[in-house]
Image (cartoon, rainbow, N blue to C red):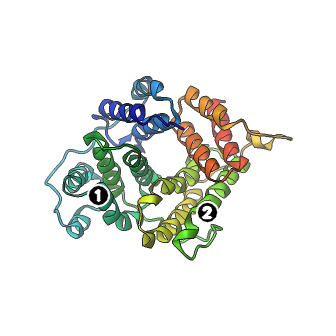
Amino acid sequence: MTTDVRRYTDCVDDALDRLWETGFEFGPDFAVHAPMVAETLATLGYTGDVPSWIEVNRRRRRYYAPPAAGDPLPDAPAEARAVALGDYRRVSDWVGFFDRRLDERPWRDVLVEWWPTLLEGAFAAFTHGLIRTAHAVRTLRTVPEPSALQLNELSRGMAYWAARYTPVPWKLANDAPAVSGPDEVPAALSELTVRQAARYAEQAPDPAVPQVHSVTAPSALRLVLPVLPDELKVRSYEAVSQVAAGIWKAVPTLSGRGPAAEEGYRPPSGEELAAEAVELGEEHCIKLAEACLRENAERPDERYLAAAHTLITKCRY
């Protein structure tokens, strides 16, 4: 993981500038991953690879322009929710709304104010509203002084989440550990993510990508957890537990055969997995590898590395 804050900051700003005209989705209605991947590459220390990755990605993806902005949303949060929550046609209006809020107040205050509302719709865009917001938060927590581009990326993450607001469509039983207080959340989050990583590696699902988010969405919460007040931590953990269970239900998959099924299997090292993911260039491989390395650093467990290796293998072949 990167320790050069200046290089990280410059890389993220350059990436956001290059991606300024990029909308939120590409055909058919898939979330744009480029800002998240650029930030992930910078976090992994691959700052020199970001410009070329962006150019290749822009050629590969048919990005849609976002809907044109209309009338500004009401400044009162309750009124804004009433008229535009869950309305993708107003995603640009949501960006303007959050830009104004961030001009007026510290970014942490704006995030905490809106977190309970957005959390209820964390299934938005198959969890990409939550994940994009979390990557923006990591940037703001990393840099000494946020830039306008970095604050705007937080606006865009929250705006996409608000515009695609979707509650988990089912009340699902799940085997996530129960927690009784905020101090238990970090350890429970580790148990949740390692169980999801193990399930992914064991099942090696086809199609390979959707169930990846059962790891990356809960792991995204860890990026935001230090900013949240105690009263929101248990609620957030319970929400992402439901999201993880919902991901497996939402997309039917077939069990495949991945590298973890081989006798005597041992996963590659984290450094090898990161290098393989970057060389391959696939968005989810890069993001899953970083999330698994980060979770493995919190609580070492080879099942994280096996999950990242499984996706890389399936995307490569």
Q: Few, some or many C-alpha atoms within 10 Å of disc 1 (few <14, some 14-19, many ≥20)?
A: some
In the rendered image, residue 24, in percent from the top left (x then y), is placed at 34, 43
Q: Quadrant of residue 199 in the image?
A: bottom right
Q: Answer with mark 1 or mark 2, whichever residue precedes in sequence.
A: 1
Residue 187: assigned label: 2
- Nearest to the observer: residue 298 or residue 35: 298
Direction from residue 41 to residue 270 in the image, left or right: right
Q: Residue at x 67, y 58 (%)?
A: 195
Relative to 30, say whether 103 is above or below.
below
Query: Farthest residue in the bottom direction?
Result: 180
Relative to 35, say whether 121 is above or below.
below
The kind of residue tagged 1 is Asp
In the rendered image, residue 209, in percent from the top left (x then y), is placed at 57, 44
- Nearest to the observer: residue 206 or residue 80: 80
Report the residue marked by disc 1.
87
The nearer-to-camera label among 1 and 2 is 2
Q: Residue at x 65, y 68 (%)?
A: 175
Q: Few, some or many C-alpha atoms within 10 Å of disc 2 (few <14, some 14-19, many ≥20)?
A: few
Q: Quadrant of residue 121 in the image?
A: bottom left
The total number of labels drawn is 2
Residue 182: assigned label: none
Q: Is residue 244 visible?
A: yes
In the rendered image, residue 122, in percent from the top left (x then y), is placed at 43, 60
Q: Residue at x 50, y 70 (%)?
A: 234
The kind of residue tagged 2 is Ala
